[in-house]
Image (spheres, rainbow, N blue to C red):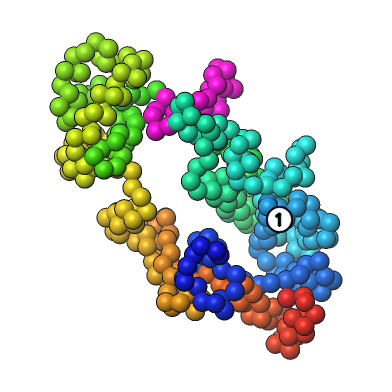
Amino acid sequence: MQGEGPTWKKDAGPISNYFSSVNRNKKSVTLDIKKPKGKEILKALAKKADILTDSSVENFKPGTMDRLGLGYNCLKELNPGLIYASISGYGTSGPYAKRGGYDPIAGAEAGLLHVTGERNGPPVRPGIGMVDMSTGLYLHGAILAALHARSRRGVGQRVDASLFETQVSLLTNVGLAWLNLGIEAQRWGCQHPSIAPYDAFKTKDRYLVCGATNDAQFAGLCKLLGLEALITDERFATNPKRVENRELLGPIFNAAFSKKTADEWTELFEQTSLPFGPINNMQSTFAHPQTQARGMIAEMETDTAESGQIRVIGPAVKFSKTVTSLRSPPPRLGQHTAEVLAGIGIDAQGVDELRQNGVV
């Protein structure tokens, strides 16, 4: 990928940090499913599979698999136990079903961008693909539920997830405030809509987030900042009053925080039970002691990188009985085609013929 410097070998093929971030422990097979032989191979693979996923987002138009005779209704006849999992922009029904899916568009139409950004500023897209990632996580849970249902009922089913519906579901409390009270959501930046103070404050060198969720914490925070006079100030006596007068509190707290660095404030906060955390860049995030202690950085050997290794982000969930492992690095495109096709009886000569005919 352009802009990634000398990370990858010139003969590595199409590979990038973007691809590598979500493709370790996977095998890569290339297959032209528009060709009759490609369709035949996919059907043979699906016949033996527990799960098949298709993604109708970005360059893969909704309904493509059905038009190719490879949709759920076709494949379930070959394998009644198949879990056929789909991700699309808007789901398989409704007026937008035929539209493609894009993370920022789904985020815009389903309310995420409306609630993201500074209070008086324009809508802002989150710094990572939150809708894409959340939809994948939703689908992951749904697949496991479908597998559990299959173990009880003996048949598979289609699981239909979409970027749009995922983001609508993530509106949670602000969505219910609109549905039940007619209260329109607004952007709050780093502030909390119903708690004050709760914000990102600028220290001498970077920002730090902290808050006071009750009166006792407010008093403790004021003492820490040398602002004891605010504790008895009637304008800030209760949280509702602090919310009402948040515009007065902000400048006072910013002035106090500006007197020390984030690290200096961190040392002081560590001696309290107040909620706080510096806003870390990537360097600080991956140097964080909790990142290190919980094994959130791992190294994998790979022949695609110039150094022979690539660092990846470790598993976010730990199990008490099962050891999570990084078994294989992100693959080259089509790296495992021959290996996988051997599982359905296609030998090396057959794979060579498929390559010559542009099927794989």
Say which of 222 and 323 sits in front.
222
> Which residue matches tag 1?
59
Q: Percent x, y for residue 101?
A: 67, 47
Quadrant position of residue 338? bottom right
| Left/right of residue 309 with respect to residue 330 in the rendered view | left
Say which of 104 and 68 sits in front.
104
| Residue type (three-letter) at the residue carrying disc 1 | Asn
Q: Percent x, y for residue 173?
A: 50, 28
Magenta span covers which residues? 172-193
Q: Percent x, y for residue 213?
A: 31, 27
Residue 48 in view in this figure: yes
- In the picture, the quarter occupied by the N terminus is bottom right
The question of residue 184 being in magenta is answered with yes
Quadrant position of residue 209? top left
Quadrant position of residue 221? top left
Establish if 132 lies above or below 10.
above
Mark 1, other Cα within 10 Å: few <14 / some 14–19 / many ≥20: few
Establish if 276 lies above or below 342.
above
Q: What residue is shown at x 29% (from left), y 42% (from top)? A: 206
The question of residue 76 being in magenta is answered with no
Q: Secondary structure at mark 1?
A: loop
| Left/right of residue 315 with respect to residue 277 in the rendered view | right
Q: What residue is shown at x 46% (from left), y 77% (from top)? A: 306
Count of numbered badges drawn on the protein: 1
Say which of 42 and 335 sits in front.
335
Residue 171 in view in this figure: no
Q: What residue is shown at x 53% (from left), y 60% (from top)? A: 18
